[in-house]
Image: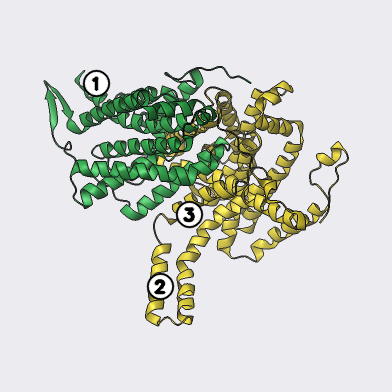
Amino acid sequence: MLDFVQQLVSGVALGCVYGLIALGFVLVYKATEVVNFAQGDLMMLGGFLAFTFIGMMGLNYWIGFAGAVAAMALFGMLAERVVVRPILGYPQFSIIMATIGLGYFLRSIAGMIWGTDDLKIETPFSQGVLRIGPLVLAYDKLSVIAATMILCTLLYLFFNKTTLGTAMRASSENMLAAYYMGIPVKRVVSIVWAISAAVATCAGVLLAPITFIHSNVGLVLGLKAFPAAVLGGFGSIPGAVVGGVLIGVIESMAGFYLAEGWKDVAPYIVLLAVLLLKPEGLFGLHVRKKV
Amino acid sequence: MRFLFKTDYEDDIRLFPHSGYYVSYGLLLAVLLIAPYVLSSYLMSQLVFVCIYATVGVALLILTGFTGQASLGHAAFLAIGAYTAAYLQTYNVPFPVYFLAAGLLSGCIGALVGFPALRLQGIYLVIATISFALIVEEILARWESVTHGNEGMRVKTLSLLGVAVPRDSPTFYFLCLAVLVLTIVGTLNLLRSPTGRAFVAIRDSETAARSMGVNVALYKVKSFAISAAITGFAGVLFAHKLSFISPEMFTLQLSIEFIIVILIGGTFSLHGAVLGAIFIVMIDPFLTYLKDDMPGIIAGIAATFGAGTQAAANVQSKVAAFASLNGLKGAIYGIIIVLFVLFEPLGLYGRWLKIKLFFQLFPLYKRATFKRQKIYVKSERNR
């Protein structure tokens, strides 16, 4: 039982990271029908930037964190402007390939700049554990869970209570209608990319104490975030986080209770099963196709 | 230059549009046949890889280019072909048998993947094929009794009718070339058959195809199976060429490389697959060239333009350091993909067509001829 709870907590913590990356997919997908295959690499880049600010320049953790988030938000806008905007409206395959290319590029550049060693960020949560009776919970894992909850609340409030959030929802529903109503759709899309890059950076920094940062981490975790996004329903923000947590827990449990090797494939088996049985996911809308 | 006037249906479904093609392809084939006696062994080996990559490119083109089903899992089919060959070889099965068996097996598995793919479209299909490939990769690493896990498997020298065919011999190259040519001719024939027309119809509009009486499900599965089978055949040759296979050779990276092959070549024509294969295989020699010869040449240029010996040596060492950077290949891939998608969506073959058309229509050429149609973004979810 104790083992089970331990595994559950670490699964939820890992799942929150998947969920945050999946959140980035979903934000961008909702706004522009584009799936950003470079989302994991944005996360990796954010982690490296935070490492540069905190580990190499010796800034305070929180200042470095904020600096990395701000820098990556700008980078997200730049990426949208340079790579995605010129091909919006072309077949989805082109856009998928463009973002794959972007991811490739970011991975190699990060490898050139920061080397191929595993890097680690010292955070205020790196040490120390919370003991509840016989249960030992590490602070770094708890911090991931807490931060995910805070971020989700913020995003929820942003989308539902602010004018900009409403504009985003409007342009994700119908771009042309939103444009006619005076919403600056292009700027809105830019901001969506900025937010998704910022969220990815948060995931990267939070993840740093749990797994190390290296140039391939984005690819590995980005691929794990697909099952999360699909399980939640690709267009649903709460779905992404719930899906991420579920995938994290499934992976963690499979690693503990099943034979070796299941841990890595379990998320994908779940993904294929979901695609077969309930392609719209847990929170997705089932919409009949009109011809 | 010649104008083609198609006057009946027969003109439209001819294998080659006009007789001039027989001359040019015949010349190309002759050049390819004497190549092993002229080129260095390194270039020959690259040429074999071009053949293999082009075969996979053609296979992927059938699926992605002509049926409109994107797949990022073709490395898995290649792996299935390669491992079938390596496994059957341990039982001394002759080459033709395991060659066919590899194609058959990966074709069957391709059909099995095709069934779930029927319900999926666009991005979901891409994700599903990625996860299929990752699962296959994991199975290859874990099923040790058959695949020897991460230790990998040694592939014995190919023996055809009792004669050994080493992997760097001209005969092996001819074999790969034959497979490629057969694949291309077969695909050309497939595409002018009712099946191929159904594929193209499905790509252009699934709804329209269905209303014309095309059995969409059947043809999608067929397309998957054919594509996977050809990839399986290529896998056998790939295994023999490498003479050693292990699971980490068949990663997502390889699948992406195959996609790059058809993307760079152009996703609408078989020429594209071959051009793309040449392009992607030649990146490696290009990088070697950049690493070995380029620094000297640049230093030489610097020296002739009056820079001192010291400065020239400086330039040389800088260029060499740049060329031997670790991730240079990945960065080049990334930039190439993005640039092609942004600026040359029709690929290398599209560029060739543009050049050809420019000279055919000389004073009247309009750039807008090849302009992409922008579809206004409408939510898939509400469609």
The answer to whether residue B213 is above or below residue B243 is above
Q: Secondary structure at mark 3?
A: helix
* Label whose residue precedes the other's in the sequence (2 or 3): 2
Q: Nearer the viewer, residue B269 or A262?
A: B269
**Residue in view at x 81 percent, y 42 percent:** B14
Q: Do the residues indicated by labels 3 and 1 lie within the same chain of the protein?
A: no
Colour of chain A, in one word, is green
The crowding category of the residue bearing disc 3, from other C-alpha atoms within 10 Å (few below 14, some 14 to 19, many at least 20), is some
Identify the subunit bearing mark 2. Answer: B
Q: Pointer 1 indicates a residue of which chain?
A: A
User: For the residue marked with disc 3, what is the amino acid?
Assistant: Ile
Residue that label 3 marks? B332
Select label 2 or label 1 by which is in front.
2
> Percent position (x, y) of residue A253?
31, 24
The answer to whether marks 2 and 1 sit on the same chain is: no
Q: Which quarter shows the N terminus of chain B?
A: bottom right
Answer whether labels 2 and 3 touch (C-beta < 8 Å): no
**The quadrant where residue B117 appears:** top right
Please provide percent x and percent y for residue A178: 50, 28
Distance between the alpha carbons at the discs numbered 3 and 1: 46 Å
Relative image position of residue B16 (x, y in whole percent):
79, 46
| The residue positioned farthest toward the right in the image shown | B7
- Given this view, does label 3 or label 1 mark the residue nearer the observer? 3
